[in-house]
Amino acid sequence: MKKYLLFLYIIFLAQVQAQQEIIPQLKFEELENRIAEMPADLLVVNFWATTCAPCVKELPDFMEVNRKYESNPGFKMLLVTLDRTRDMERVKKFITDKNIAAKVVLLDDNKRMNTWIPRFDPEWGGEIPVTIFYRKGVKVHFHNGEMSKPELEEIISKHLN
């Protein structure tokens, strides 16, 4: 039994590592298209960075909630890091060390921040963390700031059938 559990654990770690070996670097339009085209009844998009203390603090709750809902084919979570491309190795190490299992992309479009930030939400001033919920491609909720696990679960259960 112990060997079997060890085998499963190794498979899980290999899957997480393989998933995060290549983190896509996207421009705003590519991210916007990915969000619009992602097949999900409910898509949770979290903007974060490894240098943001509230972001790092909330990620374990996001991963716990992601594990809870990942078997639901209508649920998807996308973590959008705003770290710089030159810090990619730090991002990869962070993802591995923290066992981040949700899909991660890097938004490599800092020069046009003032253009794309209000396109996600006019109330967003650019601070992180920020979480946006999309139901079948349409934004249904915008949360500016750190989210607790109960807040996250409440919004998900409200919008996920």
Image (cartoon, rainbow, N blue to C red):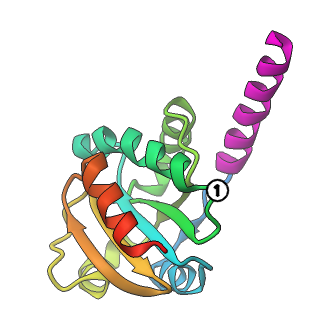
User: In the displayed image of the protein, which residue is found farthest to the top?
Assistant: 2
Residue under the point 67% across and 53% down: 22
Task: Give the structural element (helix, strand or loop) at label 1.
Answer: loop
List x then y, in percent, for residue 143.
23, 67
Residue under the point 24% across and 82% down: 121
Residue 5 is left or right of residue 132, and the answer is right
Front residue of 54 and 28: 54
List x then y, in percent, for residue 73.
65, 67
Residue under the point 52% across and 48% down: 68
Mark 1 Cα-neighbour bin, 10 Å: few <14, some 14–19, many ≥20: few
Q: Quadrant of residue 93?
A: top right
Majority SS type along the magenta span: helix
Front residue of 150 and 146: 150
User: In the displayed image of the protein, which residue is found farthest to the front?
Assistant: 161
State yes or no: residue 14 in magenta. Answer: yes
Three-letter amino acid code at disc 1? Ser
**Does residue 161 sit above or below 128 in this rendering?**
below
Residue tagged 1: 71
Front residue of 62 and 124: 62
Q: Quadrant of residue 151?
A: bottom left
List x then y, in percent, for residue 58.
31, 44
Front residue of 13 and 87: 13
Residue under the point 42% across and 67% down: 45
Residue 160 is left or right of residue 55, and the answer is right
Q: Quadrant of residue 123?
A: bottom left
Residue 71 is left or right of residue 53, and the answer is right
Q: Which residues are magenta?
A: 1-21
List x then y, in percent, for residue 74.
59, 72
Question: Which quadrant does the N terminus fall into?
Answer: top right
